[in-house]
Amino acid sequence: MKAYKTLLLCSCDKSQTFDSEALRKAAAAEQVIAVDQLCGSEMSVAAEHLAASNDVLIACGQQAALFERLAEDVYAEIQHSAPLQSIDIRDRAGWSAPDAKPERLHAKQAALVAAAQLPAPMAPAKNIQSSGVCCIVGPTEKAIRMAELVQDELGVTCIVNDAGPIQLPSAAYDVAKGQLTGAYGALGNFKLEFAHLQPLHPAGRGELGYEAAKPTARSECDVFIDLRGGAPAFPSHEKRNGYFWADPKKSGELERIALTAREMVGEFEKTVYFRLEESLCAHSRANKPGCTRCLDVCPTEAIFSVGDHIQIDSDICAGCGSCAAVCPTSAVTMNETPFEALTKAVEVMAKVYREHTHESPRLVFHTLEAGTEAIANLARYDNGLADDLIPMALEHVDRIGHAEIMAAFGAGYAEVLILADNELDRRAVTAEVELAQAMLKGTHNSPSRVRVISAIELCDAGDNAGRVSDPVLLVGGRRDITRVTVAAMSEKIEEPIPLPVGAPYGAIEIDSDKCTLCLACVSLCPTGALGDHPDRPEVQFTENACVQCGICESTCPETAITLKPQLDVSKAALSARALHGEEPFECIKCGTPFGVASTINRIVEKLENQHWMYKNSDNVQLIKMCDDCRVKAQFHGSTAPMAGGERPRVRTSDDYLDS
């Protein structure tokens, strides 16, 4: 079979238009076939080209599942397999307001098709084993009822937390009474802690009872069903695999949970969303606290401290990417949506759109599920996306940080918007959006060029008509691209841009009256932003390397260091500069430089005629000597405390011969 690529276009019953040649070039296809009802009366066209071509791209997102089934049937008949790719260019581009400019819509369609041709990053996966051991916690009536629903598939233990009537024991599940005090883990590896646990005592005649209470108890299980009715046991509980929380406000919760929980037996594939480079982590040094940004933003509490760096529990991690968005050193990166892949897609879409319209587009980040659904509803029942607004779907918008926003501006977008599905999403990206807005203030641009929006605002037209933002070369990491973009957007670089507290860029200030130049801050700086001078006591600082982790501030014994969040995009920030330094003190005996002059003088001032060892003696001169001269003075001086008697003359061979 000949290897060539076919692009199948559908006008969706003539409700959208497109530029076939532009789309062919964007898809790098050999041929383009355009029809009006690809999923209906002209489905045979799809079947024909699926059988004839090794590579088919169908520009229809709504009926993607239908075409996948069709491809399976066609490939089964001709006994070969080939990739089938589908893409939506209708809801995201083709359907827009009646007064939308066709050239913009066609350019946006081409941009979406071009970005879809980029290789998709592959995320590794791990296997999770679940034997079906289930723990149900809640009131007696609900817990027993849930146990009856899942007992055939799961090995159940009920921990009731009330004084409800005890039913006759069942051999299918165990019952105990206690209060849940702690929970950790995820599917296949939950660890639960209880207080006052009382196992049911099934023996004997008469009313059933519980055994003596244990002060504390621990249990492990694969599946955890929480029927207590209060707050969930985990933050962002809906992202915790294997955990089921019954919302007391909803009816039918037990049946809904049982339907899914019964399937939690066997081997499951769990995506490892992140990559952690421990050596880059600036969390701590020598037990001195530093950066905690990822710990502060993780919604599932999958991140925890282990000494000088953090660790991430891959079983708990839900892949939102908020840790990667705020990590100042790129110690945490994402496997599914790495910064480099995201930047490349953003860059390609802007380039294609600009080539066709000679204008700058706007960009909106949205979630793959709820955001896509909102866009589809606006397209069908409202005016749809504005004609210059290019959408980019991600699993979670938490993944978007200031670097991704600035990369979009660097690619040439006029505005960057983030569609928040709910208030949690809005809060998750607020700090990074505010940081990007602060950077824009320093470039004489409007901070409103980046903002969080609701779905209805997707229809609003932008004010960028005719504007063209020159792109920059998007090469390097998050900090490199941020710095280059801000510098390019600045009309004139004068002063550093002030940033909010907690920003990962900035300088440090040293109080010279307090600093003793002990250089403890230099020895513990995790990024090399702080250094010393090889020939004299001096603290040097390279601002571009500083991530404002705060280790230097917490390390300084004199509390002489203050963090100053700012972004300096001048060349001066790339080179080391002296923050504080002094001339070294020269030994009064040999002239060798040692120590810090102010420190030596301060010690002399505090001890001379104040301490008994330094009264009415020349001992204070020892402080002004280097190590070698001090030792010699202590052993050989006439009044030295360690001086011995006169050394005997060395006897020679002549002495022995004369005797």
Image (tube, rainbow, N blue to C red):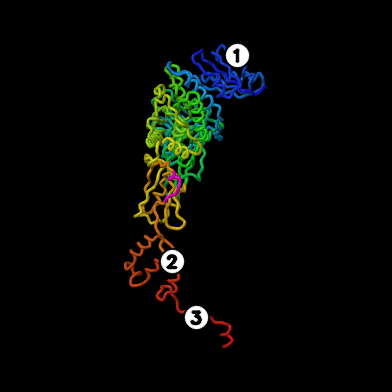
Residue at (43, 62) in percent of width and height: 594
Q: Position of residue 232 (x, y in %)?
A: 41, 32
Q: Position of residue 20 (x, y in %)?
A: 55, 18
- Is 574 part of what is drawn in magenta? yes
Q: Nearer the viewer, mark 3 or mark 2?
A: 2
What residue did someone put label 1 on? 44
Q: Is residue 657 left or right of residue 328?
A: right
Q: Is residue 304 above or below residue 46?
A: below
What residue did someone put label 2 on? 591
Residue 648: numbered disc? 3
Q: Is residue 162 visible?
A: no
Task: Mark 3 or mark 2: name the one nearer the start of the chain.
Answer: 2
Q: Which residues are magenta?
A: 571-577
Amino acid marked by disc 2: Gly
Task: Mark 2 or mark 1: name the one nearer the start of the chain.
Answer: 1
Q: Residues within 10 Å of mark 3 (few under 14, many from 20)?
A: few
> What is the spatial separation of the Cα atoms under label 3 and label 2, in whole angstroms?
32 Å
Q: Position of residue 648 (x, y in %)?
A: 49, 80
- Is 294 part of what is drawn in magenta? no
